[in-house]
Amino acid sequence: MHRWRQTFVPTLREAPADATMPSHALLIRAGYIRQLTAGVYEYLPLGWRVLKKLCAIIREEMDAAGGSELLLPALQPMDLFKKSGRAEAYGDDLFTLEDRHDRATALGPTHEEVITDMLRGELTSYKQLPLTLYQIQSKFRDEPRPRAGLLRGREFIMKDAYSFHVRVEGEGGLNETYDRLYEAYSNIFTRCGLDFTVVDAEAGPIGGSASHEFMVNCDNGEDTILRCHVTGYAANVEKCEIGFRLWSFGDGAEGAGGEPTRHHTPNMPGIEGVAQHLGTTPAGMLKTIVFEVAGAEDGDGLRWVLAVVRGDHEVNEGKLRDAVAKETGGRKLAMADDKRAHAAGFAIGYVSPRAILGIDPEHGGMMMLIDPDAATAGEWATGADEADHHVTGFRWRREMGDVLEDPRRVRVLDIRNARAGDPSPGTGGPVLSEQRGIEVGHIFKLGDKYSSVLGLEVMDEAQKRAPVIMGCYGIGVSRTMAACVEMSHDDSGIVWPAPLAPYHVEIIVMKPGDERQDTLARELADELSARGLDVLIDDRAERPGVKFKDADLVGIPVRLTLGDKALDAGGVEFKRRADEGKGEVAPTAEVVARCMEAIGAIGSSA
Ligand code: ATP
Ligand code: MG
């Protein structure tokens, strides 16, 4: 049992101006968190109570799935990141510093390197595997845009787990643990009362083959999810495949003899404006984006990749990277640097597919990847490969000729982001629909990505040395707390699901100092505590209106109000936070049972 006056719940009437997401505004207003600096938050007593409850659920489920908890350092030698290649993959997102001996050090964004390095020399035999270790700890990422409070911080709390195996399939293999943790994650988010979808995901800088994200189905979410309601397929837009699309460059005969028409199009902001000026729509335009292979030099194999999509579509960099992985040797592909691209002869902003014909091969190898929706016969509007100019009447076959038949230079394949209405993969009929989500968990099959570069090997059953097979599994703990608020609030404040609520019952004493009210508050609190409920007594000498407003803001599931009128009638006012309107007077003798019922009911539905 706690008393409001002995704890620290600094509620505010107004949210900070930059708090546009409800969870951000409400967690600050209700006194759960405060911002120290951009993307860095203090967890106040109420916030920390919620996090501890969430962590307890996570620990229960992780332990039940065979995990063991440990705690690794946040300070990590940079050398490890250089070895794994993540120094480059994370780039500026990695917080780095130098110690007094000039040793390069990083603050952990996750712990694949540290844990792999720790187990090297400790694990020697397949007999010690499988093994699942996890921790709950602060992580550090210098996010370019920390925003929305706890949803995207620069210091945030994560549960990260790592599993170690001698094989992928079969008993004790990666797949078995992966499936078990998939279940554990589903249990965790279900127990938090969250409505979520599990989607196919991009592995990103963490790497590996298969990966799934746990997405809270929230319209305010940052991520876009695509789903097929017929096949059940669901994927992050970063990963989502698109079903079969018919394409054709047309036959040589069509439009023979004609010429595209050039147009002067200076200073036009955006593709919409250009399309309108050219008498078409973005869907009638070809968008050609120049990508460059990281670190590639002239004469050193593939350097430039032209990505051609319809003007109303977006290039998917992951699909592009995968499509040329063989040619790039897995090197990073990024949008070309303007200066270097200009020097190589690209009219950036006005590039057309014809750039592949016009650029001097001295400037390095070049390939063009075309999305099927952009590879269709008929007339297109596109850049003119000259500053401030576009052309209309572009026809693939006529303008490009035989190069279209050379698979070393031109390929047609899925390189764009899926969107609502696209055909769903593996089917002819059903289409994808779109929704938004908040990523609260992400699990990865890493394989030997970290173990092979960091030298983590064991003797397998055949007495051969083999790199350990790994999986890793993250939950954004502080983000999950915010996601719960995002999903469960109203105009007056937070409405906690019982399993995460900082307290189950709030007792408002209308006249603190009044003997009868104080005594009853204490008796009720003792009895509720004895039954396992957490109780907060609002014993402040504030006006009732202030206390009621704060109770709604803070969002504790059950409110009991002890006032003279109800007490005279032999009862106290009972109200569920989730219910509308005023509470009702319940006979004092029944109040504890009513609380148990309310919390139990909320608990089991959550
Ligand atoms: P995002 O795509 O949202 O940036 P991520 O894919 O980089 O996240 P992971 O590396 O998969 O994140 O980290 C595991 C989990 O940690 C994520 O699923 C997410 O819930 C949480 N997380 C990641 N970045 C942040 C952040 N900046 N603030 C709060 N939680 C985060
Ligand atoms: Mg992720």
Image (cartoon, helix red, strand yellow):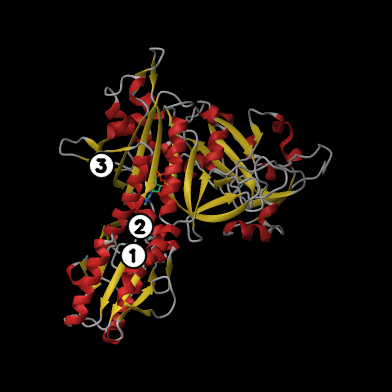
Q: Secondary structure at mark 2?
A: helix
The image's mark for residue 150 is 2
Q: Looking at the image, is mark 2 or mark 3 earlier in the sequence?
A: 3
Q: Is residue 556 left or right of residue 104?
A: right
The image's mark for residue 27 is 1
The image's mark for residue 74 is 3
Residue 154 in sight:
no
Q: Badge 2: few (under 14), some or many (20 or more) residues near its Cα, within 10 Å?
A: many
> Is the residue 310 above or below the residue 411 in the image?
below
From the viewer's side, name the closer residue of 382 and 557. 557
Q: Position of residue 4 (x, y in %)?
A: 22, 71
**Identity, as a three-letter code, of the amino acid under mark 1:** Leu
From the viewer's side, name the closer residue of 576 and 551. 576
Q: Are marks 2 and 1 in contact (CB under 8 Å)?
A: yes
> Is the residue 429 above or below the residue 39 in the image?
above
Q: Are marks 3 and 1 in contact (CB under 8 Å)?
A: no
**Identity, as a three-letter code, of the amino acid under mark 2:** Leu
Count of marks overlaid on the render: 3
